[in-house]
Image (cartoon, coloured by chain):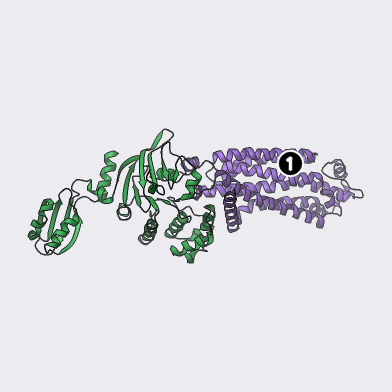
Amino acid sequence: MDPSRDAGVDVRGLSKVFGARAVLDDVSLRVAPGEIVALLGPNGAGKTTTLRILAGLITATRGEGVVAGVALDGSLQRLRARVGLLTETPGLWDRLTVHDNLLTYARLYGVAAPASRVRALLDQFGLAGRADDRAGVLSKGQRQRVALMRALVAEPAVLLLDEPTSGLDPDAARVVRDAIAAARGRGVAVLLSTHQLDEAATLADRIAVLQQRLLADDTPAGLARRQPGSDRVVIDVEGDARQWASVVAPMATAVDASGAVLTVTLAPGRAVPDAVAALVGAGARVHGVRQAGPPLEAAYLALVRRDG
Amino acid sequence: MGDAVSRMGAIAAKELAELRAAPAVLAGPMMMLVTAVAVPFLVAIGVPWWAGESLADAEDLAAMARDSAAVVWRPGLGAEAAAQAFLLAQFVPLLVLVPVVGAMALVTTSIVDELKGRSLEPLLATPITTLELIAAKAGGAFVVAMTLLAVGTALFAVATAVLAAPGVLATLLSPTAAALLLGLAPGAAAATLMLGVVTSSRAKDARTAQQFSVLVVLPLVGLFVSRIGDGVSPAAMLTVAVVAWAFTVLLAIVGVRVFDRERILTRWMQ
């Protein structure tokens, strides 16, 4: 196994059966350190079950692998010590202060200097002023931030997040996304489940589509490109677009020019930057570029509907 | 080992902090404590005083007092004092119910609140083991239950010294009372705690867990306590205490099994 994966997630053939009901079937996943992978899937697709298995909360019926350097069939206590889990609901102790919530977890994880670690987190997440407030009086966004701090309190090698921005207002969601991106910057392997395709597209390096089994595991752009027509781009240029059609023709299978808009179907192996560079090189002023084909949502829906 | 102690300490401290923040959970046990302390003095001292009669005149009572094993006779103890001591001794076993009720209320509320507040999943995702978690929760509740017992016993003793006739307190300090309060009460509280762990890990709310546990525990404790007035020996009481501790260990083993992470998360927190 690649040693660089030891600190991340590398699991193969995970299956989980509850009674007679199969929830997961032969799921293999990799999340490298410093990488964010979004787990997409409809309700009941097995996302939470996957996260719970990787967090050492429940065991897989079949499958093997390593999470944060610990084998799934090894010491789950050791695994839990190296993984941070953000559960679907914050699950704070409402009667305790924010500080005491975090301090208890710091002590549970055996953090060397728990009080200073908690102070550092409160400062980092902008909640130092609420440290002595009871968790029960916080807003939903603040509660989610505290829950994320709790998941990060032991500086885990792997961070598992179950719908981290669900139900949050845009500002609170941005704060949480920034924190997740910062964790990636520190080399943490992040696996997050979400229903928000925009979030997956902007935050994740790769997207894994799950519906009991793994339907796809690709970059957001790669996933979108799986749809027919996804290789079509719309380029807004200054002036009459027809004069630039011949510039992009060598790298396209079809070019349509209308008004100030070029619609280009890229040839295999060609990418948007090639077309833009050619246009700019020829003297065109490019005002905007966007995907003409179906967005990520269409690709996702096509996958899960085809499987469902 | 050090890590385990640290983790259990973290949970015990959190339990006590939650109790300080919401002491209402102690309302039931406090009512029990007040009852266990007030009713005996109401019966043995308040009612005769209000009726203007002396217990020394009740010959049947004096005869029962002389025959009772619950009272250690002391030379020179007057008839009034003997009757008071006899009556108060009948109520001392009520103090056993104080830590039992307290333990039940604390542990069931603690676990069911974790289930309902969905704080159990992140807690179970930490390195804490099931045994450590149960021991920490039960341990914190046990300390509080024993504190309630100590407070109740102290209040009972002070009230006896202040309100009862001279010599009554010394009469009540019998081997029977010692076996009851130092042996049986902790054993009964510990067994109740573990029963509370088992029932609350499967209950949807604290009241259901308490009702189920109380249905099992109180009749047993009540039956035993009711026999004490008939002269259960201290040795027999200590034997029952040992049985209660053995029952506690058995229930702890069952508790660890029913507190299985996967079952809790997939069947009881859905």
Identify the residue under disc 1: B225
Q: Residue at x 25, y 48 (%)?
A: A222
Relative image position of residue A202 (x, y in whole percent) = 30, 56
- Left or right of A274 in this view: B15: right
Output the chain of dot 1: B
For the residue pair A105 and B109, the one nearer the viewer reads as A105
Q: Residue at x 84, y 51 (%)?
A: B170
- Left or right of A222 in this view: B144: right
Q: Colour of chain B?
A: purple
Residue B188, by quadrant, is: top right
Relative image position of residue A152 (x, y in whole percent) = 45, 55
Q: Mark 1: which amino acid?
A: Val
| B226 vs A136: above or below | above
Relative image position of residue B229 (x, y in whole percent) = 79, 41
Q: Which chain is green?
A: A
Question: Under tag 1, what secondary structure?
Answer: helix
Crowd tier of the residue under label 1, counting other residues whose Cα lies within 10 Å: few below 14, some 14–19, many 20 or above: many
Q: Residue at x 72, y 50 (%)?
A: B36
For the residue pair A121 and A250, the one nearer the viewer reads as A250
Question: Is residue A163 visible in the rendered structure shown here?
Answer: no
